[in-house]
Every structure is written in C-alpha cells, then in structure tokens.
C-alpha cells in the first residue's frame, strides 16, 4: 500500500482545535485558549505534513495509538517554549546561597546529600547555572553531596541539555571570566560546557502532571519551577503544586517565576520573604 500523501494545506476547524486542546491538556496540563489557535494550528499543520497524514483526523487518531509517544514528544517540543539563558533571574540563586542553603544544611551533617531540582529545565541553562553559581559563590560547596536534577517533558530539549552546546546569546549574562572557565569555543562560534559540569547534572524526562511518575522524586530540598505554571489552568496548577509538595523534604523551598503567585494557587507552602527574593517553604513538620 503506497504511503498517504499529506494534503498541501490541511485545514483545522474550530471543533478540531477544541478537541486537540482538550486532549493535550489532559496529557500535559498545558491549556491553550482561543487566542493561541493560530500558534497551535501552525504547529499541528507542520506535523500533519511531515508525518504524511491525510488530514487532522488521521493525525489526531495516530497520536492516540500505543506507539505514538515519539510523535507526541515532537509535537510537544513544538508547542512548548524552550528559550532561556544562563543566570536568568539569578537573584534567586543569591537567595539560595545566602538563605535557603544555610537553613537546609544547618539540619545536616557534613557529607550528607541535598537535592536541587530544576523543573522544567528546558535545554539545561538553569540547572547548569545552579551548578556554576554554587561553585563560584558557596563556600561550603565541597562539604556536602550535592545532587542537581534537571527534568522536562520535552525529550528534544533534554537531549540538547545533555549535549551542553550553546549559542552565544544563551551566555550573554555570564561574566567573560566564567565563560572562559566553564566553556570551550567551537569552530562555529558556539560554546561547549566543560565535561565536569555536564556530568554534575542528571537529566530525566517527566510530566509534572503525572503523580505516579513524580513519586520517583523524593526528599527534594530546593525546586526551581519558573515560568511553567503560567501555561496551566487553575486545576493543573493546583495538582502540580501538590505533586511538588509531595516530592519535597520537610523545610524545602520552591522558587517560582517573577510573574507567578503561589498564594493564588495553594496555601500549603509558607511564604518566605528574603532581601533577594520571595520563595515558598514546605513546613518542617510537613509530611
């Protein structure tokens, strides 16, 4: 049987858009409103054409097959924003070193482990920034077993994170001395992160809406979840925050993006106001 030839310009109706958005929301927690239809349609049409699907209905049916995970991941990569850079919102890193970590390690003995989680980590700039910031600014960095985890739903972004190769624009906030210390310049004017730093972060694929998958993470001391919840609706935000709470060690901290508000989502975390940033803490007695 010859392969199906994709339509030159497949059409997506309003009903198709609503049906797809409902399915994507149930799978990822990400909600697209009516104002995003052009954005979503354009990316759906791209995948319909590249997979050789005849129309939206054929493509949508293929997404729900048991073997559709690779295609769903490609579509998710197109529909999620992965643009970021090193030392973004680094005032929270300062807060981590000056306030959060001292509180955490005061309850630990030297040599014990603590865990920092970047979720979503995109292409790795955030978790690698955490590693660099700790090396450069925390005098106790060698006294503890530090585990840094980067997680994302997008496997393409994770592959780029593991490769550790970046365009110049991703490094624009890094001082030149840090670029020279932690990166090598490639022939095409890109930059490769030092192997020692690449090896310091463990990357994993996870959907934060999947409570069972999230149970694989436990006793997390600090979570950086910045600029993800703005894409969720109220119920998805609440479910995600509860999943994070369940993963965290008592007394752990969570950092959100500057435009996100925990108080509008849940009261299970206690707000902590520090000079550098407001963060949120799981109570010490929290189970």
Image: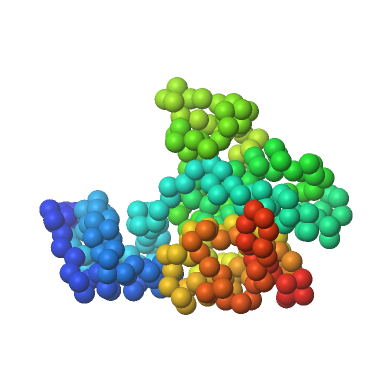
Residue that lies at the very extreme toward the right in this rendered image: 109
Q: Where, by quadrant of the figure, is residue 56 drawn? A: bottom left
Q: Does residue 283 sit above or below 112 in this rendering?
A: below
Q: Which quadrant of the figure contains the C terminus?
A: bottom right
Taking the image as shown, residue 74 lies to the left or right of residue 248, namely left
Where does the image place residue 227, in percent across and percent down from the top left?
48, 58
Q: Which quadrant of the figure contains the N terminus?
A: bottom left
Q: Where, by quadrant of the figure, is residue 109 drawn? A: bottom right
Of 13 and 255, nearer the camera is 255
Please give the name of the residue rendered at 72% of the width and 57% of the height, measured from the top-left corner. 100
Report the number of discs. Answer: 0
Residue 1 seen in render: no
Where does the image place residue 105, in percent across and percent down from the top left?
80, 55
Please give the name of the residue rendered at 58% of the width and 54% of the height, measured from the top-left corner. 118
Residue 238 seen in render: yes
Residue that lies at the very extreme toward the left in this rendered image: 8
Residue that lies at the very extreme toward the front in this rendered image: 275
Q: Does residue 287 sit above or below 41 in this rendering?
A: below
Picture colour scheme: rainbow
Please give the name of the residue rendered at 65% of the width and 69% of the height, measured from the top-left corner. 271
Please give the name of the residue rendered at 29% of the width and 63% of the height, measured from the top-left corner. 36
Taking the image as shown, residue 215 lies to the left or right of residue 107, namely left
Where does the image place residue 199, in percent across and percent down from the top left?
64, 40
Where does the image place residue 115, in percent across and percent down from the top left?
70, 55
């Amino acid at each position: 049987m010859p392969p199906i030839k994709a339509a030159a310009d497949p059409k997506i109706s309003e009903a198709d858009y609503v049906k797809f958005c409902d399915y994507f929301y149930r799978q990822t927690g990400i909600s697209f409103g009516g104002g995003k239809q052009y954005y979503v349609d354009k990316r759906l049409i791209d995948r319909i054409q590249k997979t050789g699907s005849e129309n939206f209905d054929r493509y949508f049916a293929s997404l729900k097959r048991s073997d559709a995970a690779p295609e769903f991941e490609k579509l998710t990569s197109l529909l999620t924003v992965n643009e970021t850079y090193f030392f973004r919102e680094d005032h929270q890193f300062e807060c981590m070193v000056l306030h959060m970590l001292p509180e955490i390690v005061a309850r630990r003995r030297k040599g014990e482990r603590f865990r920092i989680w970047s979720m979503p980590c995109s292409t790795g700039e955030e978790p690698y920034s955490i590693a660099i910031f700790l090396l450069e600014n925390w005098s106790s960095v060698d006294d503890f077993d530090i585990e840094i985890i980067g997680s994302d739903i997008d496997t393409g972004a994770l592959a780029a994170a593991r490769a550790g190769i970046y365009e110049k624009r991703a490094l624009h906030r890094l001082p030149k001395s840090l670029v020279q210390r932690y990166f090598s310049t490639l022939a095409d004017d890109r930059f490769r992160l030092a192997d020692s730093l690449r090896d310091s972060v463990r990357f994993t694929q996870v959907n934060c809406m999947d409570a069972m998958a999230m149970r694989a993470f436990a006793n997390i001391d600090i979570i950086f979840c910045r600029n993800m919840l703005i894409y969720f609706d109220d119920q998805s935000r609440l479910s995600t925050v509860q999943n994070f709470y369940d993963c965290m060690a008592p007394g752990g901290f969570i950092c959100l993006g500057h435009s996100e508000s925990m108080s509008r989502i849940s009261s299970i975390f206690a707000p902590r106001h520090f000079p550098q940033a407001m963060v949120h803490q799981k109570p010490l007695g929290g189970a």
